[in-house]
Amino acid sequence: MKHSRRQFIILSTTGATALLLNSKVQAQTMVSPSDPEAAALGFVSDASKANKAKYPQYAAGQKCGSCVLYQGAAGSADGPCGLFPGKHVPSNGWCSGYTKKS
Ligand code: SF4
């Protein structure tokens, strides 16, 4: 009886750890500028490197962190974006879908 309780605790801990690690890995999957969807929108991880010739709507100061589609917490380094489900964008990134948060 004591032995099976120990096994239960070990298996429960292992399972919980695996779930925690899995969710952490998923949360850290970042959008890459080379992803086809991202490239099509001119996504860059550093807003200051936006292609100003191709996207003249870009203005200095625009970045994911101030975009209405950015779902990260205020002040976070990265967070989810409504255009890239399941991935994060850096708060200093930018793409042509930028819409200023009101
Ligand atoms: Fe960043 Fe907004 Fe483009 Fe998403 S839509 S990548 S938050 S600028």
Image (cartoon, grey):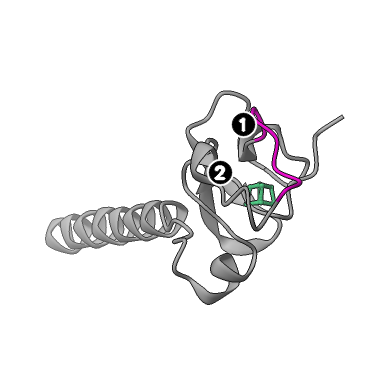
- Of the residues shown, which amino acid type is indicated by label 2? Gly
Residue 21 x %, y %: 32, 55
Q: Nearer the viewer, residue 36 or 53?
A: 53
Q: Secondary structure at mark 2?
A: strand
The verdict on residue 37 being magenta is no
Q: Which residue is mark 1?
A: 73
Residue 11 x %, y %: 24, 62
As drawn, which residue projects farthest toward the bottom? Answer: 36
Tags 2 and 1 touching, CB below 8 Å: yes
At horizontal 48% and vertical 71% (from top left) the residue drawn is: 35
As drawn, which residue projects farthest toward the front? Answer: 53
The reply, left or right, for residue 60 in relation to residue 99 is: left
Magenta stretch: helix, strand or loop mostly: loop
Residue 58 x %, y %: 70, 42
Q: Which residues are magenta?
A: 56-62
Q: Is mark 2 within 8 Å of ligand 1?
A: no
Q: Give the total of numbered labels.
A: 2
Q: Nearer the viewer, residue 26 or 3?
A: 26
Q: Secondary structure at mark 1?
A: loop
Q: Which mark is residue 31?
A: none
At horizontal 67% and vertical 34% (from top left) the residue drawn is: 62
Q: Nearer the viewer, residue 70 or 21?
A: 70
Q: Which mark is residue 79?
A: 2
At horizontal 87% and vertical 29% (from top left) the residue drawn is: 102
